């Protein structure tokens, strides 16, 4: 069963990822902890380093997405099952521990980044604090599909 999770700071998403890694988790969706962390890292890194040029094709629908979808995502009401660009879809055979650490590094890089952040293909330019809220809400959505397991039924990866 999907759990309710509303994290507003990226540091909290890293802490939650590390907690799930340590305690064990049950998948209630399609992706493992490692896959979720890879997906989140790829999206955060694109925000810092730039998105592929072809993603600017979403520019004509950006105002509608910003008006309709962004507020839902930020309040923790992100719709499930929205397809993402294939470059952000993680492969199946990822190591949870390694991906959690890479995600933590990506978050630290984002938080320490003083330069320009690239506009989101669907939502456009946001301030750094708005992007942090967006990334935390995005992480909350994905991490909500992982739930705690009983201590004696730990997941082995």
Image (cartoon, helix red, strand yellow):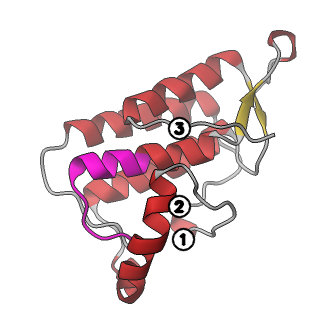
For the C terminus, the quadrant is top right
Residue picked out by circle 1: 85
Whether residues under marks 1 and 2 lie with C-beta atoms below 8 angstroms apart, the answer is yes
Q: Is residue 28 placed above or below 65 in the rendered structure?
A: above
Reading the image, the residue beneath label 3 is 6
Across and down, in percent, residue 126 comes to 25, 60
Q: CA distance from mark 1 to mark 2?
A: 6 Å
Q: Was residue 29 drawn as part of the magenta stretch in this picture?
A: no
Q: Residue at x 33, y 45 (%)?
A: 132
Residue 54 visible in the displayed image: no
Check disc 1: other Cα within 10 Å, few if <14, some if 14-19, many if 20+: few
Marks 1, 3: nearer the viewer = 3
Identify the residue at the far bottom of this view.
Answer: 60
Residue found at x 54% / y 49%: 76
Question: Magenta part of the protein: which range?
Answer: 123-135
Q: Report if residue 128 lies within the magenta region.
A: yes
């Amino acid at each position: 069963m999907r759990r309710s999770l509303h994290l507003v700071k990226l540091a909290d998403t890293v802490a939650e990822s590390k907690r799930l890694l340590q305690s064990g988790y049950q998948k209630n969706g399609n992706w493992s902890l490692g896959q979720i962390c890879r997906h989140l890292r790829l999206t955060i890194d694109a925000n810092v380093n730039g998105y592929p040029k072809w993603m600017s094709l979403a520019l004509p629908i950006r105002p509608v997405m910003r008006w309709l979808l962004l507020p839902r995502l930020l309040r923790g009401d992100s719709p499930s099952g929205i397809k993402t660009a294939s470059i952000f879809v993680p492969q199946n055979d990822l190591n949870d521990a390694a991906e959690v650490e890479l995600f933590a590094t990506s978050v630290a890089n984002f938080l320490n980044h003083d330069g320009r952040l690239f506009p989101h293909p669907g939502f456009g330019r946001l301030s750094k604090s708005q992007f942090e809220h967006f990334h935390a809400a995005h992480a909350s959505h994905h991490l909500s599909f992982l739930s705690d397991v009983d201590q004696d039924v730990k997941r082995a990866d």
